[in-house]
Amino acid sequence: MNQTQLENYAKLIVHYGVNIREGQPLVISSPIECAPFARIVAAEAYRVGASDVTLNWNDELFTKLRFDLAPDKIFDEFPAWHQSMYNDNIRAGAAFVGISASDPELLKGVPTEKVARAQKARKIALHEYFEAAMGNKNAWCVVSVPTVSWAKKVFPDCKADEAVERLWDVILKSVRADLADPLGAWDIHKKTLKHRTDFLNAKHFAKLRYKNSIGTDVTVELPPKHIWQCGGERTVAGREFIANMPTEEVFTLPSRNGVNGKIVSALPLNYNGNLIENFCLTIENGRVIDYSAEKGYETLKSLLATDEGSLYLGEVALVPYDSPIRNTGILFFNTLFDENAACHFAFGKAYPTCLEGGTDLTKEALAAAGANDSLTHEDFMVGTIDLDIRGITADGEEVPVFTNGNFAF
């Protein structure tokens, strides 16, 4: 790969993604297959003054082996040392980079109940970490790097090396690392996203009404004190960071009990190494009361059974159909990319940062303000080329927000 572009990517992650300050620790969670790039990011972090870098490796082939062969009881447990690594770094003010890259069907054939138990144990053990990340107490950034299994899923007709090279090319372009001035390009991009959030925050819609030809017809109430956000968030201490690279979305939270209608998925969802495809949700007073899926029904069932909050929505995100990711014509089978190719919702926990003063509220106060709580937060895509979204103000005025899949303003 082009070394300059790889270094540009690492600089974007360190300087804009987590915006490392001198003396700050950094944790990089990465598949072992992505180790060469993780080391480039670590080197850049040290250059700008990181106090230390922890490389937190994972091995998806071992993950599969463990699900196949380990004693059953182990999937209700989470190692104390691993919990301490996350929590100790959260308390030390560390920033976190996550490299998202996995075989979309790694755990095909593994009992969904076993996978769900393992995920639940992890989320309970790392509750402090997830609360800090979603409350922007620590800077965090999710990025992607190709692996052979993922690249072959995206480009099935290519040989392994060619598939990886093609996926690298798309990733580097999507994060603007291929440009002469990537940092300047991100400055311009952030201004575009901010223009959209400024419009939506000024309108302060009470509801959004979604309709398209594949069957989505849903009304989403927004809490009175909701805030639209985008790439270029801030920690509670005021330091800017970008949680996802790439990012094309603007987002807020729905009112927990204020979603009514039908939602049909527009793209497959890769969840815990299994694909959920062509699924449909019926929602009443915020709660999923019925659902179906052409593929991955049991996986969807396990996701919705995580806890009571997983049956409610925690995020509303707007992404134009005419976006750089969608225009590649590629289905990535990776939520980081696919969510930036389509409008999406999320099952589960809401971001407290999307409410005025939300990071200072107790759980009870957040719930009273309309925010959903859950162990999970899982994005799924609903945007189509003919999606129409109308914003409805408190006095009943209807304003076009999306027309034919794209922003109307």
Image: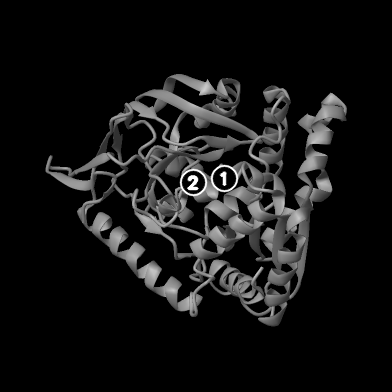
Q: Quadrant of residue 395?
A: top left
Which sits in the foreground, 104 or 231? 104
Residue linked to disc 1: 334
Q: Secondary structure at mark 1?
A: loop
Query: In this rendering, would 22 be left or right of 345?
Result: right
Which sits in the foreground, 186 or 258? 186
Q: Within 10 Å of the Cα at label 1, are there few (<14), some (14-19), or many (20+) other Cα atoms?
A: many
**Number of numbered labels in the structure image:** 2
Query: In this rendering, would 225 be left or right of 187?
Result: left
Across and down, in percent, residue 146 comes to 65, 54
Query: In this rendering, would 23 be left or right of 231?
Result: right
State which quarter of the image contains the C terminus.
bottom left
Which sits in the foreground, 56 or 359? 56
Q: Specify the label residue 225 is tagged with.
A: none
Across and down, in percent, residue 165 comes to 64, 59
Residue contact at pointers 2 and 1, CB within 8 angstroms:
yes
Across and down, in percent, residue 145 comes to 64, 57
Q: Quadrant of residue 258?
A: top left
Q: Is residue 326 above or below residue 186?
A: above
Across and down, in percent, residue 372 comes to 45, 38
Q: Specify the label residue 338 is tagged with.
A: 2
Question: Label 2 to label 1, Cα distance in Å?
Answer: 6 Å
What amino acid is found at the position of numbered circle 1 in the picture?
Answer: Asn
Residue 185 visible in image: yes
Q: Is residue 113 above or below residue 130?
A: above
